[in-house]
């Protein structure tokens, strides 16, 4: 980081000039604490969206440039972290006062870009959501930096508006030959699935055998009736409609007895099928 900031000092770095290249150079030099690494990713995301870095980050850069204080930087260094690559997306529940929906979340990570592509006169990529029977949906556009071996993919969140067996995000060199540089896959929502369980704190999908705690977000198909045993109840009288997925409803459930006691959630439909979940 000291060498990178030394070059920035010669260039009289200002807040406006702290751009993607400088932050990326610092990021890929590595060896920082997880907290500072996360802050670097956040600033990269801001700059990629056309914004300036935050003032607190700019102040840190200026302080290190002026002082050329290697001791502060060295004290923040630990074992060099591995680059985050190939992390699959996941379906998560989004719930606030205005909306209830499912989103596909891709964690920020890096993708290696071959040198001929980095040097191409067409230097932008797209991340597309590609589903059967639908036109590809562009969810992000990214510029390739010819000086960096890796392209940083920011956190991406896409609302799910159609049920699929599998959701696929693809990084394409849209500006050149539309080639797929990498792809990420996530298991989707099949017609045979009448319910999905979400952790009420993380909003991530959980398996039946991992149920614990006193709260649960319970997503179920609208053609099924929910039967709750004593000791467990819904936090609202009526289920919540799920935006863009009209066939699903959401119940926020809470235990009203001691955690070690066993309660059940059951589903039943008009055909006589019954399913015990918990």
Image (cartoon, helix red, strand yellow):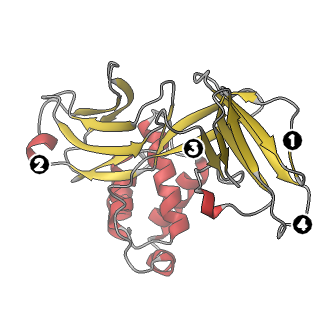
Q: Which mark is residue 235?
A: 1
Front residue of 41 and 225: 225
Q: CA distance from mark 1 to mark 3?
A: 20 Å
Q: Residue 132: image x %, image y %? A: 32, 25
Residue at the outermost front position: 272
Q: CA distance from mark 1 to mark 2?
A: 55 Å
Front residue of 48 and 22: 48
Q: CA distance from mark 2 to mark 3?
A: 36 Å
For residue 78, side relative to residue 268 (left or right) = left
Q: Which residue is mark 3?
A: 92
Q: Upstream in the sequence, badge 1 or badge 2?
A: 2
Tell us which disc is closer to us: 1 or 2.
1
Image height check: is 157 above or below 57?
above
Q: Residue 165: image x %, image y %? A: 40, 36
For residue 125, side relative to residue 103 (left or right) = left
Disc 4 crowd rating (10 Å Cα; few below 14, some 14-19, many 20+) is: few
């Amino acid at each position: 980081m000291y060498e990178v900031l030394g070059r920035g000092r010669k260039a009289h770095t200002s807040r406006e000039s702290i751009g993607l290249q400088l932050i990326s150079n610092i990021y890929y030099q590595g060896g920082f604490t997880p907290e500072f690494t996360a802050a670097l990713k956040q600033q990269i995301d801001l700059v990629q969206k056309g914004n300036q870095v935050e003032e607190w980050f700019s102040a840190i850069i200026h302080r290190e440039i002026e002082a050329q204080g290697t001791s502060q930087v060295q004290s923040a260094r630990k074992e060099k972290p591995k680059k985050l690559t190939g992390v699959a997306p996941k379906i998560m529940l989004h719930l606030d006062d205005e909306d209830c929906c499912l989103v596909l979340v891709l964690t920020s990570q890096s993708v290696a870009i071959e040198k001929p592509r980095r040097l191409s006169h067409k230097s932008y990529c797209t991340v597309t959501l590609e589903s059967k029977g639908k036109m590809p949906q562009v969810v992000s556009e990214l510029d390739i930096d010819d000086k960096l071996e890796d392209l940083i993919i920011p956190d991406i969140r896409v609302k799910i508006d159609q049920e699929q067996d599998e959701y696929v995000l693809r990084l394409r060199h849209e500006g050149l030959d539309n080639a797929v540089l990498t792809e990420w896959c996530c298991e989707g929502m099949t017609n045979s699935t009448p319910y999905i369980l979400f952790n009420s704190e993380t909003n991530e999908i959980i398996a039946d055998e991992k149920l614990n705690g006193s709260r649960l977000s319970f997503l179920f198909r609208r053609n099924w009736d929910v039967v709750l045993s004593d000791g467990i109840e819904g936090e609202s009288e009526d289920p919540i409609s799920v935006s863009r997925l009209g066939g699903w409803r959401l119940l926020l459930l809470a235990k009203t007895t001691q955690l070690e006691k066993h309660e059940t959630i059951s589903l039943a439909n008009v055909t006589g099928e019954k399913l015990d979940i918990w």
